[in-house]
Amino acid sequence: MTDLDTFFKPKSVAIIGASRNPKRVGHVILKRMIEIGYPGKLYPVNPKANEILGLKCYPSIEEIPDKVELTVIALRADLTPSALEESAKKGAKAAIVISGGFSEIGNYELEDRLLSIAKNYGIRIIGPNCLGIFDPKNRIDTLFLPKEVIPRPRAGEVSIITQSGSLGSTLLTMIRKEGRGLSKFISYGNRVDVDEGDLISYLAEDDDTKVIAAYIEGVADGRKFMDAIRYASIKKPVVVLKGGRTASGDRAVKSHTGSLAGRSDIFEAAVSQSGGIIVDTLDEFVDVPVALSTQPPMYGDKVAVLTNGGGFGILAVDALEMRGFKVSPPSRDLMRKLKDILPPYYPVGNPTDLTGDSTPEQFLDSGLLIAESGEYDALFLIPLLGVPGMVPEKTESMLIQLVKNSEIPIVATAVPTTPDVEDVLHRMEEKGLPIYPTPERAASSLYGLRQYGKMRSRNSQ
Amino acid sequence: MTDLDTFFKPKSVAIIGASRNPKRVGHVILKRMIEIGYPGKLYPVNPKANEILGLKCYPSIEEIPDKVELTVIALRADLTPSALEESAKKGAKAAIVISGGFSEIGNYELEDRLLSIAKNYGIRIIGPNCLGIFDPKNRIDTLFLPKEVIPRPRAGEVSIITQSGSLGSTLLTMIRKEGRGLSKFISYGNRVDVDEGDLISYLAEDDDTKVIAAYIEGVADGRKFMDAIRYASIKKPVVVLKGGRTASGDRAVKSHTGSLAGRSDIFEAAVSQSGGIIVDTLDEFVDVPVALSTQPPMYGDKVAVLTNGGGFGILAVDALEMRGFKVSPPSRDLMRKLKDILPPYYPVGNPTDLTGDSTPEQFLDSGLLIAESGEYDALFLIPLLGVPGMVPEKTESMLIQLVKNSEIPIVATAVPTTPDVEDVLHRMEEKGLPIYPTPERAASSLYGLRQYGKMRSRNSQ
């Protein structure tokens, strides 16, 4: 019962509650599975239809002529247990129960019936009361949010799990708007069976997932959850945002999901102890994983800032020092080397200011000198593209070359002045340079790399 | 010498150094003045051209047949003093000196010559080494950044002053991308004459400016600056972001502008003492003024959260409590009133969760009950538009009605899921509801309203 692979790589999927009415959840899910190009066999189930969206429709799951590995159930709550049982009898190994109307409105008994069916038949359940799964690489999308309402992000290397569906859909928007990608997105709702611990353990083994990000209001099983984080974080970073960290927030969690969160400070200490990386804001939750998925851990506190905007450089230095980093001047030797390759009127130091006359080559050459000097533990780039010398295509290739040739982590902040510039920034990020719209957000992400570095050093001792 | 009106409402402008070459600063500025529809008389000055962009070109300012009120000088540094002197002789009352190559590269003597000309003739100078002015209402734009490189924001009610040009152009992008507006944008560079104190005093009297936002690395005259803030903040909020708050940041300021910033903690305490509102991040610098320009000050610490996303509501409560706000449950009486008008399964409390079944009417009705109860000092809205009941146009009219009928401040956080939704959110903000993409940013803006409320209470005692 530990293999959750069927949820992500099913050879056949039945959608129980598929509908001809475009407003129904069961219609949207079927449509999304078709749109995303799900490569296996797709069986709509609905006793009142012969065909939906061009696919033959079956009156019941029983009557599907072939095997069914995964069922997606989008029915009224009271009809859901029998559909689950029929799925299990048909041989399905996994079910995503989208249907709501269970423990979240006090209907505990009905939810218990789902659990006992799961136990009796060995079928695994994600849900109920959830959005389910979006996995652009394996081409699964059970989110009942039309693409026109919530456009989906591209494929990427960060996987997200979230109990809250509304927060989940918000995260999809934030990630897409920044041009970022996702490996697996899992909204698991009331987690009658598969919980956050199972999912983190599964994602630990998933080769398509480089970083795990978990939004947690409360956990089903604290020990299992911490064990999963401990296990996973040896293999890859696990980022955790805890909803309900304050007294009133905790009260809100209890009313929202009925989770017993326990004291947040203790929870957060346990997560850190287990190797997880705690973040504090929604921006950090989507920003930090991007740095972790492309950059090495940071093994010290010293940061060099390389900018072509003076004021911007100052704000970066402030943001870095406020995060506890050291932004000290380079050695005389490094100063001399930088001065040797830069025009005489460029201020060299920390920050080094390449000014409005900057070129991509100068970013590359001085970036390499800094990275190779051994004097800094990370490089903070501010390549503003609004000046004539910073030709976008050249900037892209030079900065990616810098990232590829640097052994210390690099993060950047840059401003998407126009849609064209925004595209270039997104492309650079896709190729491995994490880019943030403000210096504070870039500094927070570097802080995430530093946390991961500390954890790794602790574990290797 | 205190009236700076000529900079913003000149009847005639000469552009000295206007050029036929589209890459030259003097060309871009002339083009921008034409594009923005400057309503007065425009005179390009260049001895080597007869006509530029369809306008008759004059060999020198002397030879312009009419009066010239403002000159914009975009020449090599060494040619600038005589151009300034000729402008003054021609009767110009004000000059924006775009030209660089003065104190910022150690050329103090040349800069002193500008100052002595200003003193001899009574002509006022903004600059040198600056972007100058962008004022969409009065249709002035001397920023030498083509619109295609840095698109401009719409007209609005917040005025920004910045010493740093590169940070200034970044701010323009941030403001435009959020659909926000600007009254006046002033990049004043080396401030040989007009300084931050002058500008704040001027904006204090400007009816088109509701909020003043100042990015400050160091000030020319500390006492004058604090006096200006004290004077201005009686009339309108003054928001200050200090670059170089940390030790390394301060070192970077010295190398960037040569400003003697002095100790930042003392500076920030003096700004607060004078009635200014200190912000800490670039996001806050553009977010807080939006709330201040549309909402009343906040006179207590109690906030009610009204959401249609449970997880989002929890993060909002956390963000608010971390900012020192109180998010306590409503009285029994208010609870009863809310339950009376909402479906029985909606969780009522703080947050009150209008769930995925929410309608704009429910936001309006419950928002009014909360606002009129006298139990809260501010209302925090989370109207997610991705659910079927939240019809965009109706949401817009109902929420604006709520804002218009509420005596306590209201801020919102909402997610721009699609370009259409983004347009609706921008329109709502333009009509008076400040909207932020994350709960943390909305909470920070409410914190700005609280700071302003405290300052007002202090002053009225």
Image (spheres, coloured by chain):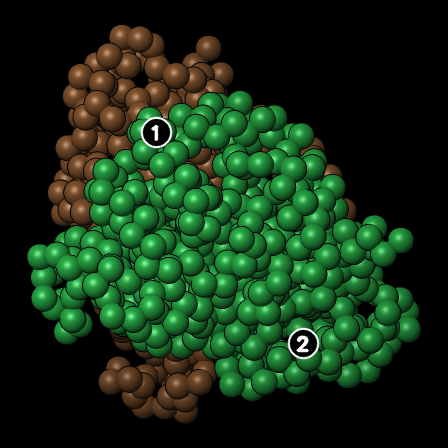
Chain colours: A green, B brown
| Marker disc for residue A109 | 1
Q: Are marks 1 and 2 in contact (CB under 8 Å)?
A: no
Q: Is residue B299 placed above or below B171 in the rendered structure?
A: above
| Marker disc for residue A139 | none
| Element class at badge 1 | helix
Callout 1 crowding tier (Cα within 10 Å): few <14, some 14–19, many ≥20: few
Do discs 1 and 2 share a chain? yes
Identify which amino acid the numbered label 2 is placed on.
Val
Callout 2 crowding tier (Cα within 10 Å): few <14, some 14–19, many ≥20: many
Q: Position of residue A6 (x, y in %)?
A: 45, 63
Picture residue at 82% right of the left edge, 75% below the top: A372
Chain under callout 1: A
Q: Is residue A31 placed above or below A229 in the rendered structure?
A: below
- In the drawing, does residue B7 fall left or right of residue B364? right
Chain under callout 2: A
Identify which amino acid the numbered label 1 is placed on.
Glu
Picture residue at 30% right of the left edge, 22% below the top: B348
Picture residue at 27% right of the left edge, 55% below the top: A144
Residue A312 appears in the rendering: no
Q: Position of residue B409 (x, y in %)?
A: 33, 28
Reading the image, the residue beneath label 2 is A403
Q: Position of residue A297 (x, y in %)?
A: 73, 61
Picture residue at 27% right of the left edge, 21% below the top: B371
Q: Is residue B378 placed above or below A119 in the rendered structure?
A: above
| Element class at badge 2 | helix
Tell me how far mark 1 sits from mark 2, CA to CA: 55 Å
Q: Residue B254 versus residue A110: which sits nearer the camera? A: A110
